[in-house]
Structures are given as C-alpha cells and as structure tokens.
Image (cartoon, rainbow, N blue to C red):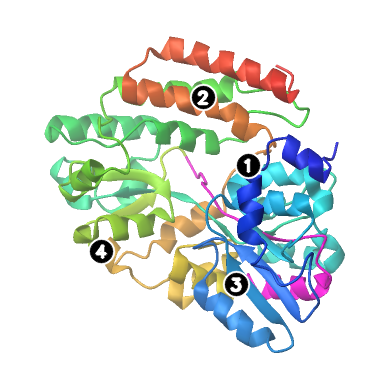
Amino acid sequence: MRLSRRGLLRAGLATGAAGALGGLASSCAVPAGSTGNNMVLWYWNGGLSDTVVKNAKKRYGPAVDLKAIQIGGYYRSKLITTMAGKAHIPDIAGLKGEDMASYLPNADQFVDLRTLGADKLKSQYLSWKWDQGVADDGSMIAFPIDCGPVGHFYQPAVFAKAGLPSEPADVSREIATWEQFFAAGEQLRKRLPGTYLLTDITSVFTMSMNQGTKQYVDKDRRFIGDEDHVRTAWARAVEAKKRGIVSSIVSGTPDALSAQEDGKLPSNLNASWASSDLKQGVPKTAGKWRVAACPGGPSNIGGSFLAITKECREPEKAFEIITWLLNAENQAQGFVDAGLFPSTPASYAMKKLTEPDPFFGGQVTMDVFGPAAQKIPVAYNSPFDIALGQPLKDEIKNVGVLGKNPEQAWKDAMSKCRRIAKHLGVSY
C-alpha cells in the first residue's frame, strides 16, 4: 500500500514540519521541480565529494545551472516534509542508506531509474548495494553512492606486546572468528591489565546482525526479531561482556579518545569511514594503526544513494548528472575527499585508492575493504526494521553499559517490540 503525501506526514516520516518548510522555502529557485536550465540537488555535509560536485557544475554549465545545496539538521525529515508539501522539491535528492527502506514503499514519489536506462549500468556497481535501491514492485528509485564495509582497526605494537598476531594478514587469518576474537581479547587483558579489545558490546551485536541475511521484519510484514539469527547476535554480545573484554568507557567521549592514544583501547570494529574518525580524533596516533578483516565475516554499515523526484521536469538530464557524479572515477575521488567508500568495484584498483596510507603505517587499506565490500550478505530491508530493531539495540546497550541482567533485557526488548509491531500493523 502506498502512502499519500499527507500519509507520509501522518506516518511519522516527517518531524518538525513547520521549521523545515520555513528554513527551506528560500533555498530552491522554483516551486516544484525545475527546468533543464536549473537543476536542484539536495544532499548533506560529506554526502558527496566537494571536488566532484564542483566539477559537475563546470561540466554541465552553462547549459544546466546545477544548484547543489547542503541541507543541515534532520535531512530526512526536511526532505519528506518538502515532498509532502509539494513545493520547493529538489530534482535530485540524496537518500541516506539507513533510511532507504522507509522510502521504498513510496516509490511512486520518485522516478523509476530503469526507465532512464539504469539497468545498462548495473554491472558496474556492487550488486547487493544496487538492489537496496529497488522497491518490492521492481522499480529502482535510488542510485548507489557509497557503502561502509567493516574492518578491524587495531594497534599492532600493542597486539605484539600482548603476544597476539600483529601483521594485517596474520590478524585477518588468526582472529577470523568471533571465538578467536574473544580469546584474543582475554589474552590482551591478561597480558596488559587495563587494556580492552572492545569499547562496548553494541558493535558486536550490530556487526553480527549485518553479517546475516535477515533483519527484524520479513517481506510478509512479520516480526522475526525473536528468531535465532537475532538471538545469536544478542548472545554473542552478552558473551563479550561476560568474558571481560569490554571497557567501561563510553564511545566517542574524550576518555575514549585518550584511551586510544594511550593504547588502552587498541582495537575498533567499524566501517571504512571510521578511518577519517581516527585521523581526526586521535591524530597523534598516526602510523600506529592497521586494518584487518572483521571477525565473523564481511559486514556493512552505512552508505547512501541519489534519487530523482517525480517533480523533476528534466529526468533524463538529472540521470545524466547522477551517473556522471557516481561513475568509478568520481567515486574514487569521493573516497579521497570524504571517505565515501565506492560502490563501483572498478574504483578499487585505481592508483589514488591503492596508495600506501601513512596513518596506517603505509598499509594499503583498500586490500582489506575492497574484498569485504564485494562479499556483503544480502538481507531484506523492511521499512519497519529501524523501529523494531531499536528496542533490541537499546537493551543490549543497557546490558553493556548499565550491567542490566541480559535475560530481563531481552524480555523488555521483546515487550517493546510487541507494542511497536501492533502499532505498525506488523504481525508478531
């Protein structure tokens, strides 16, 4: 069932409507859509390479006045609100990967990119990423920007001091399973008291879920968050806590950054874009990090898309711009400029992505992230996954940070999920 524009608002897909419209009305040059001479693109800070956007303006101007506008604040709410109001709608809109499933039931608000020849380009992109932009009815509403293959960031000097493997190939091979990862964490803590492999257990739950082919709701609109794949991810996160390999430090705090600098938190499971976080957060550790494969297999976090709205008056030109912005060469530039990991495998062998990285001791990190990106498991993403996955994420965090009893936390998560499922019309 498709939602009307009013339905989008009533479904809670837009928040802060009045503020959003008030802040956006002066941004676009036309009430709805544009002419071919005035193409409006919405995205967020860091969503595209500034260099590539600048080059696109030169390439298509003056025939096309490409107005690329970075929208601050709650991007998704502002986009949905503007589309619901049917005024000042961008021609091309960025869609964040974590929100993608919520756009798919409203595919009729976007141009089906198959009608513009998208299928001819499919082989140039990661197949699993491409499929995330396809609705249940087969229409393709979103073109891939980037993805976020997960790696094991670690400090080799600390690992070596603890008697653990320290070269990337050795870490990938000898700490390849979750059990090996936990055992390494126990050895690390035993040899170097006060040193932990994990900042929190939430990452174990998240990575484990993303290593599978199921999430929280299936295609039949049925809740599956109580099934074995979720129970396994939950139990694995709890196991990390029980085995004492998790710190009591809160992620992202000054204490966490200090611990990373001191080698007390020498390990981090995160997506490729976390490379930039490390470089900016702990610059003094330059040269002290390496990247290995994620234990348990490939996993992905994040990655976004570009779509063409139905209000666009020149969809063919918009598609031409999108496909140029997101070709392999420009995606490689996006990785260099903004850490946007390419969804185009051809980018992985390009010189600018195979240069040794001084921050990672001269390692070519693409050798780890590239193969991982091509092996991400394909999972069905339901529009209801975010709402029904949140109680589980909240409660596993309570276990890790507050020490809540895991059995009680699971019961509380299921109780919350039951209420949310009933409200959303998802069978439980």
Range covered by the magenta-colored residues: 297-326
Per the rendering, the mark at residue 392 is 2
Residue 291 lies, in percent from the top left, at 34, 54
Mark 2 → mark 3, Cα distance in angstroms: 37 Å
| Quarter residue 16 falls in | top right
Callout 2: few (<14), some (14-19), or many (20+) C-alpha neighbours within 10 Å?
many
Mark 2 → mark 1, Cα distance in angstroms: 24 Å
The mark that comes first in sequence, 2 or 1, is 1
Q: Are marks 2 and 4 in contact (CB under 8 Å)?
A: no
Callout 1: few (<14), some (14-19), or many (20+) C-alpha neighbours within 10 Å?
some
In-image side of 228 versus 201 (left or right): right
The residue that mark 1 highlights is 15
Assess whether residue 237 is covered by the magenta stretch. no
Give the vertical position of 126 relative to 337 (above or below): above
Q: Are marks 1 and 3 in contact (CB under 8 Å)?
A: no
Per the rendering, the mark at residue 361 is 4
> Which quarter of the figure is the N terminus placed in?
top right
Which mark is in front, 1 or 3? 1
The mark that comes first in sequence, 2 or 3, is 3
Instruction: Please tell me whether mark 1 sits on a helix, a strand or a loop.
Output: loop
Mark 3 → mark 4, Cα distance in angstroms: 27 Å
